[in-house]
Image (cartoon, rainbow, N blue to C red):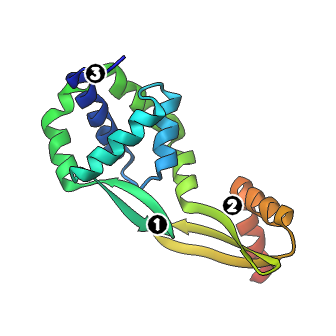
Amino acid sequence: MFNTASELAEDKLLLLYLLDKIRLPISNNQITEIILENNFINYFTLQQYLSELENANFINYIEQQDKHRIIISNSGLKVLSLFKNRISKSKKKTIDNYLENNMDNIKEQITISADYTIEGNNYIVNLKAIENNSILIDLKLNVASNKQAKDLCAKWKNNSSELYKKLFEVLI
């Protein structure tokens, strides 16, 4: 079933509304998760809309902490302010409730990163925590196996606050 022009416009405005409400650079994966969890738009249509919003200069992709993030542009904010009333109240309320319940998790995903690269026979694990645009820790570890690299990344993502605290106490 194809969307009508008004549904298409509402869906794009909903994406702008989401980006405006979050007020943080967010990854494509995070937007996708929010939209799909709430059954607003299917994956392929969502990716098409994001591309169209970028081409219209309503959103911008930026590089932050070596990752691509999406933000609403000034043009996007202007369009949203003019046409926000075209988004159904129930959809806005759903987004507002979702963000209220999940904002801490979204912020943590943005500010905590863990990844690894392969260099020769070794794996370099990069663990990072950022708060208020300041790097709290940026730690690189050389490990011998893919399993160790994955385990370190998982532990950091699941327990970074406690690990940071323990590391700080040991070093101080």
Disc 1/disc 2 C-alpha distance (Å): 15 Å
Residue at 79 percent of width and 66 percent of height: 149
Question: Farthest residue toward the top?
Answer: 1
Horizontal and vertical percent for residue 82? 12, 37
Residue at 39 percent of width and 46 percent of height: 22
Q: Which mark is residue 132?
A: 1
Residue at 52 percent of width and 35 percent of height: 101
Disc 3/disc 1 C-alpha distance (Å): 33 Å
Residue at 57 percent of width and 53 percent of height: 109
Horizontal and vertical percent for residue 23? 36, 51
Q: Which mark is residue 88?
A: 3
- Position of residue 91 relative to residue 168, above or below, is above
**In what element is the residue under mark 3?**
loop
Question: Which one is earlier in the sequence, the residue at label 1 or at label 2?
Answer: 1
- Position of residue 140 relative to residue 94, above or below, is below
Instruction: Give the amino acid type for the residue marked by disc 1 in the picture.
Output: Asn
- Local crowd size for mark 1, using a 10 Å CA cut-off: few (<14), some (14–19), many (≥20): few
**In what element is the residue under mark 1?**
loop
